[in-house]
Structures are given as structure tokens and as C-alpha cells.
């Protein structure tokens, strides 16, 4: 307002000079039109300010208080809290629920490798290129040999430095429970004593239920993060079988459970990306890597960064290996890439993924694979054979239009000896370029940045997950304020549709193109 006001007055002064000259030379005359416009402008603003401050005087009974109120109201407009609606309260859990588990890393499978994996806030050992095959295919800095099961530690490290942490749970939009559920489960997966398997999970539930923060909403505003898939936490408390019972306790079922592989048939777990090998510390780190992937020389049409599994040779994995071995346009990881059973040197794997247009993603130990996110990091278009491997999983991080960034070849087609190479070679080169660009744009949202990074503007996997958790909690709060219980998820065959369909604005659950694949696996538990 002030610059404009000064301009008006300068114009008025100029007009007065001109009018003065005209008056001297031609005699008296009426003021110019510009003079009246300026006068109208000044009077209008005077009335606005008079009304504003008189209102403040009437409401407070004091002219000074009214002016101060107006000043601070204006200040708040220009200095909005960047964390408004984003505050997170994090429990300071007893160390037995997190730090002690890290210190006891050697209890996991009796392997010292796990103790290397927990280093550097879960990123594992750094990878530096010394001229061999391990580096060179990874960024010059921020590259780590990250294990797929370390997400619980990685997420906690980010949250400890989160810019919107609050010490006031009443001000929080969500409450974070930093329990290393994955490490606890890994220590007891094969223990025949079910009480021992469930001991720490039961202990956590008892601890939470005593907290006023938990009782405020019955845990509906809480969230947990696990470095393992849902299946490791779904054993009934009194049942035999795999894993522990953490996710079956009613108190935990009220919370939001983030995991690297969710169940399409349970409603309170949500999949987030597996951690890959690049953890950038600046915007430039990310954009430089994206540009590098855009210009990568991809001499292969397709590849598979994986090895054979025992069992039926008719599985998709077996067919991929068989067809790839016969093709001059496909390549597999060599034996030199194997560091231990089921594990591959990061540099070897990334070199392969960066050399191909398409990267095969059959089932891993579960429906999903860490290699999916290694492939995205490498700018390689993923090829899926079952919708549960990605499309029903990572609904927060991957586009709903799966055709924009990936290829879907039904497992049944491959089982009937359909040619993978023929399907891929028919995709027009222009479409391949568009898909690859979409994959490269996804890179920031599926990676986990350095927790100590400052001044970054891109949203990584943690940022995306937090936004969606807070959005879910906000809907629950609104429902509670209206005196109703929000049904935002269900268990059963249609559970996965709540994320795919209702979040897209549909009012009710209905038929979906993936029905035939999901219900087939639900009924028969086929291997794909």
C-alpha cells in the first residue's frame, strides 16, 4: 500500500505543478481529473483504517490494545507456522523397545552381518568406489549397502531430526511409536516358545495402554513402522504358525501400521518402500542422479536381478530365468554378484538395472521385492506379474495409473509360456521414453534421505508417508468430533479396495480390474 500511496502523491504533486503553470499562463481553472482520483483513493483508505481501529477500540475498550491486536493479526498472516497441521509427537520409549534391540544385533540369526546393517542409523556400511565393480554404478556420495529390513531404524533416525516434532501431544497431528518391531521379530521367528515370541509385543501394548496419549483416542492417532512385512506380525496370540502376534492385538489394530509389505486383506497396515542404496543429503544430489539415469546407456531390453528358488519350475521366476537365458537382449546377475545366499553386491545389481530398459519383478520372499525400488532408482521400468506386488501395496508412493510407469504381464500368461520379450518389444519407443521419465521422476519419493540433511525441498518416502498418516488421523478426528466412528478400513477380501477406490473419490466399493487376480490368490494361495 505504501509504495502505491507514494506514487499517487507524486502524481498529485506533478499535477499541481502543471496546474500551477497553467494557472499562471491561462488563469484560474478547475483541478485535474487525476487530483480527484487521488483524493478519492486517500479518503477510501482513511475510512478503512478508521473502521478497523474503531472496531478494535470497541472490542477491547482501549485504543492501544486495538491497534496492537491489528498489528499482531497482520503479523500472523505473514508469519504462518510452517508446521501447522504437521506436528508429530514421538514417544521416548524405554530402550528395551528399540536401542537395546540394536545393541543385541548378534542375536539375529547369529550373524555379525546384521550388526553392520544397523550402523549409520540403519543405512549400513557406506559404499565407496575404489575402481572395482561395487561402486561406480552408484552415486559418488550417499551410497550405502542398506539391508531391506532396516526401515524401523531408518525411520526413527529421521523422526529424531524431524522439523515438526512437538513435546506437546495435544498439539500433535499424529503420534509416533518408535518400536523396532522388525528386529524383535527377527530374533524370535523360529522360536517354538510362543510366549517368548510375543513377550516384547505384549509388553509394548501394556505400556501404551497406560499412557494418557494413547487413551485420548484409543491409539487411533498413533502409528508404528516395521522393517518387515505384515505377515511376520499376524499370528494369532494362541495359534501356532509364523511370526508374532503384534498386529492382532486390539490396541495395535486401532493404530496405523507401516510396513514394507502390507496384506491386501487387512485394513490397518500400509506399505511403504523398501530402502534402497542411495540416501541423498541435498536437492542437487537427487537432480544430478536423475540426470545421470536419463542419459544412461541401456543396451539391454530386459533383465532380472535375482536368482533361482527351489520348488516348482513352472513359477514366474523360473520362467523369467529360462526365457532370459535364451535371449541376447536379456541378462541375469552372474554368480560373482552373490555375497551370500539371497544377497547380491549392490554395485553388481545396480550395474545390471541401469543397463536395461525393463526390470522383471516377480515375487520375492513375499509378494514384493526390494529390487522394485532398486530398479526405480536405476531408472529401469519395472515389470510386475501380480497386482499385489506393487499396485495394491504402495498406493501412497506410486501413481494410481500403473501403466504410466510399469508393465503388467499376468502370471498366468507367463505360466502358459507367453514370451516376455515379445510383449516388451511391442511397446513403442515413444511410450518407453515416457514411462522411463515417469520412473525417474518417482526416484525422490521412494528413497530415504540422509536424516541430517538441511535445506532439502524434495519429498522423500518418509515425507510422503507422514502426510498420508496425518491425513488418515485428521479424518478420524473429524469423525470423532461429529460423534461417529470412521470406518476407514475393513478386513477381508475387499480390504485393498478401500485404498484404491475410496481414496479416488468413489462412494462405495465395487468391481475392480484386479478382482480376478486377488481373489484367486486369496482362495488358492497360488504362487506367482
Image (cartoon, helix red, strand yellow):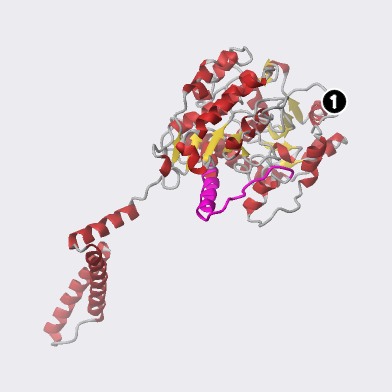
Q: Give neighbour class at mark 1: few <14, some 14-19, many 20+ (Cα, 10 Å).
A: few
At a point 27% along the width and 55% down the height, the residue shown is 72
Q: Residue furthest left?
A: 24
Q: Nearer the viewer, residue 150 or 471?
A: 471
Foreground pick, 24 / 76: 76
- Quadrant in the picture for the N terminus: bottom left
Residue range corresponding to the magenta coloring:
469-493
Near-viewer residue (146 or 521): 521
* 467 shown above or below 233: below
The residue where tag 1 is placed is: 312
Measuring from the top left, give residue 291's x and y in whole percent: 55, 37
Q: What percent of the width, then of the height, locates residue 70? A: 26, 60
User: Looking at the image, which residue is at 66% across and 25% down?
Assistant: 349
Q: Is residue 279 at least partly visible in the picture?
A: no
Q: Position of residue 501 (x, y in %)?
A: 67, 51
185 sits left or right of 35 in the view:
right
Q: Give the total of numbered labels.
A: 1
Q: Quadrant of the C terminus?
A: top right
Figure quadrant of residue 368? top right
**Disc 1, SS:** loop
Q: Magenta span has 174?
A: no
Residue at image coords 52%, 28%: 154
Query: Does the magenta-highlighted stretch encompass residue 482?
Result: yes
Amino acid at each position: 500500500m505504501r509504495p502505491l500511496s507514494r506514487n499517487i502523491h507524486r502524481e498529485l504533486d506533478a499535477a499541481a505543478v502543471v496546474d500551477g503553470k497553467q494557472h499562471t499562463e491561462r488563469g484560474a481553472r478547475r483541478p485535474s481529473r487525476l487530483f480527484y482520483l487521488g483524493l478519492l483513493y486517500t479518503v477510501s483508505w482513511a475510512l478503512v483504517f478508521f473502521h478497523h481501529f474503531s472496531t478494535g477500540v470497541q472490542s477491547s475498550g482501549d485504543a492501544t490494545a486495538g491497534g496492537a491486536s491489528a498489528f499482531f493479526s497482520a503479523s500472523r498472516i505473514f508469519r504462518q507456522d510452517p508446521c501447522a497441521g504437521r506436528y508429530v509427537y514421538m514417544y521416548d520409549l524405554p530402550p528395551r523397545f528399540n536401542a537395546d534391540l540394536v545393541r543385541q544385533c548378534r542375536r539375529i540369526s547369529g550373524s555379525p552381518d546384521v550388526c553392520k546393517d544397523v550402523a549409520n542409523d540403519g543405512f549400513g556400511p557406506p559404499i565407496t568406489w575404489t575402481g572395482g565393480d561395487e561402486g561406480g554404478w552408484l552415486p559418488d556420495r550417499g551410497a550405502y549397502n542398506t539391508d531391506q529390513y532396516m526401515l524401523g531404524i531408518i525411520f526413527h533416525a529421521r523422526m529424531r531430526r524431524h522439523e515438526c516434532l512437538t513435546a506437546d501431544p495435544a498439539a500433535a497431528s499424529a503420534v509416533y511409536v518408535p518400536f523396532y518391531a522388525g528386529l524383535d521379530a527377527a530374533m524370535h521367528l523360529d522360536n517354538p516358545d510362543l510366549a517368548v515370541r510375543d513377550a516384547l509385543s505384549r509388553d509394548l501394548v501394556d505400556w501404551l495402554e497406560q499412557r494418557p496419549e494413547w487413551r485420548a483416542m484409543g491409539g487411533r492417532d498413533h502409528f508404528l513402522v516395521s522393517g518387515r512385512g505384515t505377515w511376520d506380525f499376524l499370528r494369532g496370540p494362541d495359534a501356532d504358525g509364523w511370526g508374532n502376534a503384534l498386529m492382532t492385538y486390539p490396541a495395535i489394530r486401532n493404530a496405523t501400521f507401516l510396513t514394507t509389505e502390507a496384506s491386501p486383506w487387512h485394513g490397518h497396515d500400509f506399505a511403504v518402500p523398501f530402502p534402497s542404496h542411495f540416501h541423498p543429503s541435498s536437492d542437487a544430489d537427487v537432480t544430478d542422479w536423475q540426470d545421470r539415469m536419463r542419459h544412461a546407456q541401456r543396451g539391454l531390453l530386459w533383465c532380472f536381478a535375482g536368482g533361482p528358488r527351489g520348488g516348482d519350475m513352472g513359477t514366474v521366476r523360473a520362467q523369467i530365468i529360462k526365457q532370459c537365458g535364451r535371449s541376447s537382449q536379456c541378462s541375469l546377475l552372474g554368480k560373482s554378484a552373490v555375497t551370500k545366499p539371497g544377497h547380491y553386491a549392490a554395485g553388481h545389481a545396480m550395474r545390471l538395472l541401469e543397463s536395461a530398459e525393463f526390470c522383471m519383478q516377480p515375487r520375492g520372499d513375499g509378494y514384493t521385492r526390494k529390487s522394485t525400488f532398486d530398479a526405480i532408482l536405476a531408472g529401469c521400468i519395472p515389470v510386475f506379474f501380480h497386482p499385489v506386488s506393487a499396485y495394491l501395496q504402495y498406493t501412497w508412493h506410486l501413481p494410481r495409473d500403473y501403466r504410466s510407469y510399469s508393465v503388467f504381464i499376468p502370471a498366468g500368461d507367463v505360466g502358459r509360456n507367453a514370451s516376455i520379450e515379445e510383449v516388451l518389444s511391442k511397446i513403442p519407443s515413444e511410450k518407453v521414453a515416457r514411462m522411463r521419465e515417469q520412473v525417474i521422476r518417482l526416484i525422490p519419493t521412494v528413497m530415504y534421505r540422509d536424516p541430517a540433511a538441511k535445506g532439502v525441498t524434495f519429498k522423500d518416502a518418509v515425507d510422503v508417508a507422514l502426510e498420508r498418516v496425518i491425513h488418515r488421523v485428521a479424518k478420524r478426528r473429524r469423525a470423532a468430533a461429529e460423534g461417529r466412528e470412521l470406518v476407514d478400513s475393513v478386513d477381508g477380501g475387499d480390504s485393498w479396495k478401500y485404498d484404491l477406490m475410496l481414496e479416488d473419490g468413489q462412494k462405495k466399493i465395487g468391481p475392480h480390474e484386479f478382482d480376478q487376480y486377488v481373489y484367486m490368490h486369496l482362495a488358492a494361495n497360488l504362487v506367482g
